[in-house]
Amino acid sequence: MEPDHPYYETIVKDPRYANGPAPNEFPMFESLKLTIERTLPFWNEKIVPDIKAGKSILIAAHGNSLRGIVKHLDQMSEDAIMQLNLPTGIPFVYSLDENLKPIKSLEFLGDPETVKKAMEAVAAQGKAK
């Protein structure tokens, strides 16, 4: 986000970030690494206890947040996660064992052709037309 963006000042001056970076250090984007650093504490502190309590969890999130969780659950390498194109708007399921290790991983809830086309669309984002 550039300083001339309409929401830049609102975000940079948000009191929740008072102990965060100085305005001149504020990140202009969020890399996957930064997303993981932000989402894994939430995963460990909020979601894991609910799973251990036997609750079924539904997570609705942005692609990069989901990629961070997938990377964590599947112990994916940096290269592998960079090749994963999660399809927008197609839910997927994980089944975890008692140690929160995947029994089922990335089980998409859609017909395979629709999932494939959606993954290709994500892969094509940002490419020159």
Image: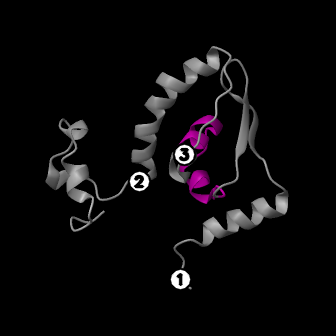
Q: Which residue is mark 1?
A: 128
The magenta region covers 68-87
Secondary-structure class at tag 1? loop
Q: Marks 3 and 1: which is nearer the front?
A: 3
Instruction: Say left or right for 29 vs 53.
Output: left
Q: Quadrant of the C terminus?
A: bottom right
Residue positioned 62% across, 67% down in the render: 123
Instruction: Say left or right for 18 vs 55.
Output: left
Query: Residue 122 placed where, x, y %?
Result: 62, 65
Residue kind at label 1, given as amino acid type:
Ala
Residue 69 colored magenta? Answer: yes
Q: Which residue is mark 2?
A: 31
- CB within 8 Å, label 1 to label 2: no
Secondary-structure class at tag 3? loop
When asked about the image quadrant of residue 60, the answer is: top right
Q: Which residue is mark 3?
A: 61
Residue positioned 16% across, 52% down in the render: 23
- CB within 8 Å, label 3 to label 1: no
Query: How would you classify the magenta stretch by its main secondary structure?
Result: helix
- CB within 8 Å, label 2 to label 3: no
Cα distance between the residues tagged 3 and 1: 27 Å
Secondary-structure class at tag 2? loop
Residue positioned 39% across, 46% down in the render: 34
Q: Is residue 78 above or below residue 120?
A: above
Extreme bottom residue here? 129
Cα distance between the residues tagged 2 and 3: 16 Å
